[in-house]
Amino acid sequence: MVKGKPSLLGALSGCVAGLVAVTPAAGYAGPMGAIVLGLVVGVVCLFFCTAIKNALGYDDALDVFGVHCIGGIVGAIGTGILVNPALGGAGIIDYAAIPPKVADYDFMAQVISQCKGVATTLVWSGVAR
């Protein structure tokens, strides 16, 4: 739609971006949360595969960075939001409680935890490479 006509590559890239984003949230997000996450990540990945790639001028013929890296980041951080039981998520189980129960959801603590995980993964991937 951005370039005036649909393409198979664009459709498949959007499907892959949605799958990449929902993978971290697979056990935690509800069905509607997963659909919303897929729609959001499709737009974000499209932006990175077009505007950011052209602005920075890096060579990414198959849009691997724009789809997999950015889609994974959005999905991992989005998991911290979609795990909220109020949004249909599964919540986080508190195994220290007897019997185990769903722990209280703290938005900021969970999203910060997800951001730390993303940062650790990016640093690990950059240094280990």
Image (tube, rainbow, N blue to C red):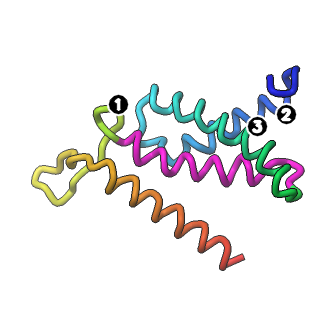
Q: Which of 23 and 55 is in front in this view?
A: 55
Is 20 left, or right, of 11 in this rendering?
A: left
Amino acid found under the numbered disc labelled 1: Gly
Element at label 2: helix
Residue found 51% across the figure and 51% down from its top: 76
Callout 3 touching callout 2 (CB < 8 Å): yes
Identity of the residue furthest to the bottom in this view:
127
Is 103 left, or right, of 62 in this rendering?
A: left
Please give the label number shown on residue 9: 2
Q: Mark 1 points at which residue?
A: 88
Residue found 42% across the figure and 37% down from its top: 29
Would you identify the image quadrant in which residue 13 lies? top right
Total tally of numbered discs in the picture: 3
Amino acid found under the numbered disc labelled 3: Ser
Amino acid found under the numbered disc labelled 2: Leu
Residue found 53% across the figure and 28% down from its top: 35
| Cα–Cα span, label 3 and label 1 | 27 Å
Range covered by the magenta-colored residues: 60-83
Quarter holding the N terminus is top right
Q: Does the magenta stretch include residue 64?
A: yes
Where is residue 60 shown, x and y percent of the image? 85, 54
Callout 1 touching callout 2 (CB < 8 Å): no
